[in-house]
Image (cartoon, helix red, strand yellow):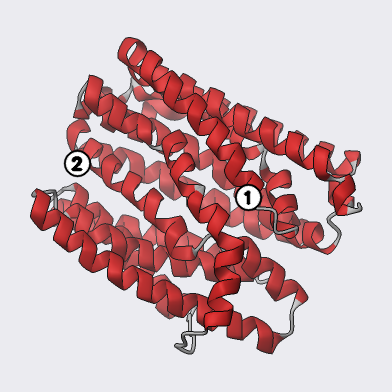
Amino acid sequence: MFKKLFYYGGFSVGTTLFGVFSLPVLTAFLTPSEYGVLGLALTVLALLLPLNTFSNEHNVQKLRTNSSLDEYYSYWSALCSFSFLVLTVAFFLAIAIVYLFNLSTVFCLIPALAFARAFRLLKQAELTVTEREFLYGMSTLLVAVLSFIITFSVFYYYNSSASIRVFGLFLAEFLVCVVVLKIRFDFQFNVIKIREIMLFGFPLMVSVIPAWFINESSRFFLLQYLSLTEVGLFTLAFQISAIYLQFNTVLANTFVKRILEDIGEAFKTKFVTLIVSIQIICVLIFLASINLFGGYFLPDSYLSSLTTANYLVVGAFFQSLGLLPSYYLSYYRSTKFRLYSLIVAAVVAIFLNFFLIPNYGTLGAALSYITAMLTYSLTLWFVVIKRKRNFNI
């Protein structure tokens, strides 16, 4: 366990440092309004990505742990083939939409980025249960390093724009998938396997919509009531808060095999207390860090985003509390309850966005996010506690 924690934690720290280091570079080259364009493009990515993985990351982990290799790789090839077909359609559809509505060309690049990132995430889900922690961590770190190098080089020598940043992310993801992870699959259209993929993932794919309203819709409210500059400031604050979620990913990767091998033991008081205690310690350290050092990394035009980031980190912490019940429901193929929890939280987010953002701007958006994420995690825990006896644990 400590070896896993060392690898996942060490690489996460490296990835986080590169993420932190890239923020002053991006904010130095991009104006807040251009950062707003980037933020809107990333909201589209957030909507596409779960549709491209079919939200099967947990299923990859479960089948790789509990199935034969032949059965697993048949499923893997069907999953990758289906994803490739869907992403191809999405790419041409994006080109048509950009042309018809005269949108920024950055939106043409989003399906390509979603394509590369989806394949990496699916492969990394497998690595977490095959105990290849080093390759998992190295691939994540290399994406951050390569995307930074590509982005900075083009920004410095040619031009700086949201499109260049997205292209840098795509190229980094693609190179890592091909060269480092060496992703391979036999192209097939297996209707039985696709049905299995959709039975598991469909509730989670549908849940993309309420999840998007919770995480991303506030940017469109800000654009409607304020300006693209506020969208850029909120996007930066949200990216800062998302760094904390990397620690939660480390935690999940460290314990995922233990959770899947004995799901009942994972919900004993001792284990739950351990997980929550680690999460509390991590969020307190992170909040202290951004308040002590955040002002040294950002130009003056972006400093106001730090206040919003503090609130968003609290929201991210509340989101992380749903870690264990999410695995629990995925294990028993009851992912529809994650969808229900997200719908409840999305209703809360939309309601609060209408009333808070016009009056409080980015702070209102952050307060909406906090309340929605607390609602989400509490609903998940309520469902799991109520259903435990039905699962015979």
Image side of residue 346 versus residue 28, left or right: right
Q: Residue at x 56, y 49 (%)?
A: 13
SS at mark 2 in the image: helix
Image side of residue 344 versus residue 43, left or right: right
Instruction: Decide: is 73 above or below 135.
Output: below
Residue 238 placed where, x, y %? 42, 34
Foreground: disc 1 or disc 2 = 1
Residue 311 placed where, x, y %? 50, 22
Residue 264 or residue 36, whichever sits in front: 264
Q: Residue at x 48, y 34 (%)?
A: 241
Give the amino acid at mark 2.
Answer: Phe
In the picture of the structure, the residue carrying the numbered disc 1 is 336
**Residue 319 sits in quarter:** top right
Neighbour tally class for label 1: few under 14, some 14-19, many 20 plus, Cα within 10 Å: some
Which quadrant is home to the N terminus? bottom right
Give the amino acid at mark 1.
Answer: Lys
Neighbour tally class for label 2: few under 14, some 14-19, many 20 plus, Cα within 10 Å: some
Q: Residue at x 38, y 28 (%)?
A: 296
In the picture of the structure, the residue carrying the numbered disc 2 is 29
Residue 202 placed where, x, y %? 54, 59
Residue 47 or residue 298, whichever sits in front: 47
Question: Can residue 286 be spotted in the picture?
Answer: no
SS at mark 1 in the image: helix
Residue 106 placed where, x, y %? 19, 53
State the CA–CA distance, disc 1 to disc 2. 43 Å
Label whose residue precedes the other's in the sequence (1 or 2) = 2
Q: Residue at x 42, y 46 (%)?
A: 19
Instruction: Decide: is 67 above or below 8.
Output: below
**Residue 256 sits in quarter:** bottom right
Instruction: Decide: is 101 above or below 367.
Output: below
